[in-house]
Image (cartoon, rainbow, N blue to C red):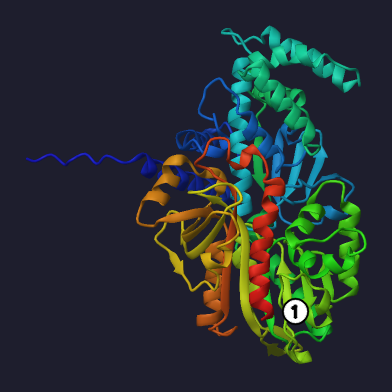
């Protein structure tokens, strides 16, 4: 009887299986209504994360070293003080905005969060499944690091060691407002965090610069304290999901309200019948391209748009940005603050009201008859699966007193940040198709942009497949190398492209909501290189290095819209 040959799996296959286990576990726990991070269900997620070893979480698999860059990354995306909370509840929009609870909005991942009491934090989830999976991933990492802190702070008999007791005394001083000797404190953290004095000093400075997070002493103390409480006295930490959140997931409750508000505004301002171009991007680059030169002509010496954009992006120039915004609102721009819960702001530009003579020389705008001037809708970045919800709803006909009116959509333009697999931060990627991670689902399309649009930019330009991943914080080198080296020939990874394309293809080729020949322009700039040590998202933002690719892509898209 012949033996069945053993199948040897590659590390990339093992890692992809770990991602699938994580998502299946998260989906199961969400439907169940809650779990304990160190219970049986939570432990399965922890083990999957440890076997995956995502690049963004650095030394997550090291039993002793606490991953400091990864902690700062997640705390910039979680509500301030979450490390102090034993109970975390994920909710939908349920009326807490009218309460008097202490409210927190993480600047790097905008979501409303409410500190209900000393031990409990409520976090609003209105951006779809990707948002829920993202936060559960961050929390799982947080609990892994908390357990390291606890182990490093106790001796072999389960007693608190001297370093921990000295940290407790430092925290007591901080709480009453007394100054502390930070350098002495670093020596205590040296044992507790398993890091060198220099590493702790650097991490402390980075935490201090981020006003949206507590300092490193407090974060370390509270992570360790709650872990010790659970270990010594069985006071469990817990994550729960509200019934309203479980009922709303998968339904376009927030996206429908958001899209209806845009179409209603266009109708009321007599813009609905004009040619429409949709751009998914940030809420400053299009506005600056159209208005900054005219608004700041007497205040800023102008040479080219890139230099202008760098000045507007610098810290301390908030007053200049305010002048541009005021000028834009007086000359054809409508700004819609989101009240639907999507956290996606919108700007609507009536190009018929632009001062064409004072546009930047990089933009070539030909004269048209009044009804031919395009209307440009700029929507802020969506998040993962939310891209499908918002684009799907935006492309649906407008219900005006029972009459279904289609927008005259001429082009859809997607600019985004992405991880690059071959190249450097700030380089540009031009997708020829999107592939869903973990599946064979793929969305090839004709991109109106190509590498020739950026030939003289001085930046690296890469053209090829983009992978739409389940979560950027779950990728590791094995998976990324597979994407790069396999027949997929991927140039980068992001979270929204396939979701957008799924909505666009349904609207144009199946539902007949928009013209099937709608022009598509996709381009991404590299916010990180997850295959390069020190260049992951956890290493910090692009800063001014992101200005050049952002405006090159914006100009290429705008030129296509206004031709």
Count of marks, rendered view: 1
Name the element at disc 1.
Answer: helix
* Residue 10 percent across, percent down from the top left: 33, 41
Residue 23 vs 330, above or below: the answer is above
Residue 486 vs 192, above or below: the answer is below
Left or right side of 449 for 233? right
Residue 225 visible in image: no
* Residue 305 percent across, percent down from the top left: 75, 62
Q: In this rendered view, identify the residue nearer to me: 538 or 101.
A: 538
Residue 243 sits in which quadrant?
bottom right
Left or right side of 347 for 324? right
The residue drawn where x is 63% and y is 82% is 410
Q: In this rendered view, identify the residue nearer to me: 496 or 197.
A: 197
Residue 134 vs 428, above or below: the answer is above
* Residue 419 percent across, percent down from the top left: 55, 50
The residue drawn where x is 82% and y is 13% is 181
Identify the image quadrant of the C terminus: bottom right
Q: In this rendered view, identify the residue nearer to me: 423 or 518.
A: 423
* Residue 446 percent across, percent down from the top left: 49, 74
Identify the image quadrant of the N terminus: top left
Residue, disc 1: 263
Residue 239 visible in image: yes
Residue 193 vs 456, above or below: the answer is above
Disc 1 packing (10 Å; few <14; some 14–19; many ≥20): many
Residue 272 sits in which quadrant?
bottom right
Residue 449 sits in which quadrant?
bottom right
């Amino acid at each position: 009887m012949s033996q069945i040959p053993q199948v040897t799996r590659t590390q990339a296959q093992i890692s992809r299986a770990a991602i699938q286990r994580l998502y299946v576990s998260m989906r199961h726990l969400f439907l169940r209504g809650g779990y304990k991070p160190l219970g049986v269900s939570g432990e399965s997620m922890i083990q999957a994360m440890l076997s995956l070893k995502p690049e963004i979480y650095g030394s997550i698999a090291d039993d002793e070293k606490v991953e400091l860059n990864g902690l700062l990354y997640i705390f910039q995306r979680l509500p301030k003080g979450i490390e102090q909370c034993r109970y975390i509840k994920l909710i939908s929009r349920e009326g807490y905005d009218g309460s008097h609870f202490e409210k927190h909005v993480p600047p790097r991942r905008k979501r409303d969060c409410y500190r209900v009491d000393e031990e409990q934090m409520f976090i609003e989830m209105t951006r779809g499944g990707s948002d829920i999976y993202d936060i559960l991933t961050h929390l799982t990492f947080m609990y892994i690091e908390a357990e390291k802190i606890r182990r490093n702070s106790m001796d072999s008999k389960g007693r608190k060691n001297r370093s921990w007791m000295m940290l407790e005394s430092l925290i007591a001083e901080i709480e009453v407002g007394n100054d502390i000797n930070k350098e002495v404190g670093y020596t205590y953290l040296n044992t507790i965090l398993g890091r060198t004095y220099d590493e702790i000093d650097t991490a402390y400075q980075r935490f201090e610069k981020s006003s949206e997070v507590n300092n490193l002493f407090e974060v370390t103390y509270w992570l360790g304290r709650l872990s010790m409480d659970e270990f010594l006295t069985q006071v469990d930490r817990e994550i729960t999901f509200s019934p309203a959140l479980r009922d709303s997931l998968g339904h376009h409750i927030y996206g429908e309200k958001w899209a209806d508000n845009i179409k209603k505004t266009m109708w009321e301002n007599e813009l609905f019948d004009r040619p429409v171009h949709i751009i998914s991007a940030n809420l400053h680059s299009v506005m600056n391209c159209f208005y900054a030169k005219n608004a700041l002509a007497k205040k800023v010496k102008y040479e080219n748009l890139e230099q202008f954009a760098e000045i507007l992006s610098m810290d301390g120039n908030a007053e200049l940005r305010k002048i541009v915004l005021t000028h834009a609102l007086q000359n054809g721009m409508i700004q819609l603050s989101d009240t639907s819960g999507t956290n996606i702001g919108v700007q609507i530009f009536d190009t018929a009201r632009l001062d064409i003579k004072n546009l930047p020389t990089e933009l070539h705008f030909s004269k048209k008859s009044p009804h031919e001037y395009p209307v440009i809708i700029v929507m802020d970045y969506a998040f993962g699966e939310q891209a499908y919800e918002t684009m799907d709803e935006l492309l649906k006909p407008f219900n005006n007193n029972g009459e279904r009116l289609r927008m005259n959509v001429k082009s859809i333009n997607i600019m985004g940040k992405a991880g690059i697999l071959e190249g450097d931060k700030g380089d540009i990627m031009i997708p020829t198709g999107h592939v869903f991670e973990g599946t064979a689902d793929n969305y090839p399309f004709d991109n109106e942009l190509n590498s020739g649009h950026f030939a003289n930019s001085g930046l690296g330009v890469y053209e090829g497949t983009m992978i739409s991943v389940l979560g950027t914080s779950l990728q590791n080198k094995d998976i990324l190398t597979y994407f790069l080296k396999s027949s997929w020939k991927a140039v980068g990874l992001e979270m929204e492209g396939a979701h957008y394309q799924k909505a666009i293809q349904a609207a144009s080729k199946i539902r007949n909501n928009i013209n099937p020949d709608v022009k598509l322009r996709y381009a991404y700039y590299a916010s990180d290189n997850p295959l390069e040590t020190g260049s992951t998202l956890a290493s910090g933002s692009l800063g001014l290095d992101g200005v050049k690719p952002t405006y090159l892509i914006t100009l290429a898209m705008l030129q296509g819209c206004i031709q």
